[in-house]
Image (cartoon, helix red, strand yellow):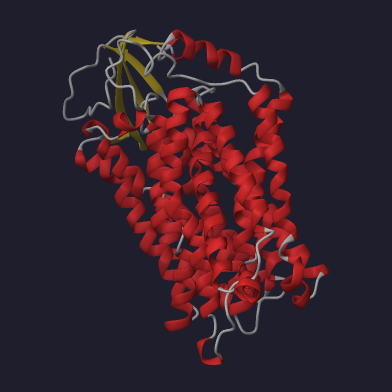
Amino acid sequence: MASQEIDDRPKDGEAGSASIAEAETEPLLTTIFGVMGNVLEWYDFALFGFFSDIISDVFFPEEDEDDEHSNLIKSFAIFGSAFLMRPIGGMLIGYVGDKHGRKHALTRSLFLMAIPTTLMGLLPTYDQVGGLAIVLLVLCRLLQGISVGGQLPASLVYTVEKRDPAHWGYYGALPMVAANCGTLLGNLCGAFMREILTQEQLRDFGWRLPFFSGIIIAFVACYLSRHGQDVHTNANVYDSETSEIKNPLRAAFRRENRLALFSTSLGPMLWAAGFYLTYVWLAIYMEELLDPSVTNAFWVNACSLFFGMTFMLPIAGHASDRLGRIRTMTVAALALMVAGPIMLVVIARGGSFAAFLAQWSVGVMLSFFGAPLCAWLVESFDSSVRLTSASLGYDLAHAIAAGYSPAMATALFKDVGKYAPGMLYTIFGFLSLVGIYTNHFCGGKNLTVEGGDASTTGSTNLSNNNGISSANGTGNGDLELSSNSNTPDENNVPLPQIS
């Protein structure tokens, strides 16, 4: 097998190489606006969760005394409806990114978020128009789901494809940091509004104010659309006259890619459910569901989110570059499956400081699972179908696990007991491990242990009008390139070949 240096590895067309070289000289201001777009998008998306208790009062009829928390479950169900649209958004935005360039995918997802978020602040309440208010709220939330379904994978691929694959763990964690900053901003907004306004003022008008900030993201999208430099690794792959396949969606669903799609649809479930349980639902759990409630619950949640996730994600990503993706994710998943339910008991029984320590511990474990997950997703697919496939797998996991985990947790609290929601960490942790190891046991990826170090080794093939190339990735960030790797064997399952 002929090997070559990473910097000289074959690209999917000369235009793709040029776009990466240009992106590496991207102006600082454009980078800042790109990060702002990610932060603001997730701020807009997370607001609904942090105001779910207020929304349950404003958009639903008054609940009976013997049916306490039923409206909150309905509110969380609408929160989860956005996640049902994420796979659709992932396919649409992924198609644009794979065929027309990563920048186009990113800016379109930002525009899609600005409109429904701003409209949400203008919606009439149930007392004003009855059931129509619920319908309009669901429609706005569905549009948000389409937007965010393509945004994070587009941002992730856009970021890491410009970097040395040996550091994809670290750089793959950065879009997660930006997303967490947006969620943290939504948390701080919820905490601040509850400090300065009474409960009656929040119900009357206060809940609307944060949603009006959604218009800011439109200006960020305009700037990136005009000044941002593109990364288009698939230039001439789908548009060439000699291209056999002209649609990345069709390529993503080819037989050779289905095992990786299945694996990446299960693998992210612990991150998906764990994040929204820990940093969206737990704030409401500590504030509204526990009796007595945890003092300063939203501030506890914000501090835990910053120190347990936002601060730790780059460290965890860098660790996965050294230790390997699979090893890091497996240890974190097993730890969370055991410790997650215990930490929920600590939160339910303890005061503010105990709640912070318990939630922070869960956040650290989630970080060491979620940060390597980003690079693992990118490494699972060839660049020709990378954004479409990674978006679809990641968003399917979120549609199944994340969207309704707050509603499931609230239902478990109501019907089983206040400690019961902790079992969700164990359930989704098990499903994630099944997904991560599916490629190994089914022949798509191999787990190798050499010298005490575990890493994943996989192969992806791409054939285009420039010839045939194969990229063999390892879980510790190493990338070996070879040519003319065309014949699959038991350790090599090729991805879609485009000629």
Farthest residue in the right direction? Answer: 196
The residue nearer to you, when weighing 21 against 436, is 21
User: Please, is residue 393 above or below residue 305 in the view?
Assistant: above
Q: Can residue 120 be seen in this view?
A: yes
215 over 140 or under it: above or below: above
Q: Quadrant of the C terminus?
A: top left
The residue closer to the viewer here, 331 or 188, is 188
The location of residue 445, given as percent across then percent down, is 27, 35
Q: In this view, does 105 lie above or below 16?
A: below
Res. 311 in view: no
Q: Quadrant of the N terminus?
A: top left
Count every numbered label the image shows and give the total.
0
Q: Where is residue 261 in the image (x, y as percent from the top left)?
A: 31, 40
**x and y, in percent, of residue 95 in the image:** 42, 31
Residue 158 locus on image (x, y percent): 53, 29
Q: Judge left or right: residue 302 versus residue 402.
A: right
Which quadrant would residue 390 be assigned to in this image?
Answer: top left
| Residue shown at 40% from the left, 24% from the top | 383
Residue at image location 41% in from the left, 61% down from the top: 337
**With 397 as the anchor, is 406 left or right in this view?**
right
For image coordinates 65% across by 84% down, the residue present is 292
Query: From this viewpoint, which residue is outermost toward the front?
Result: 129
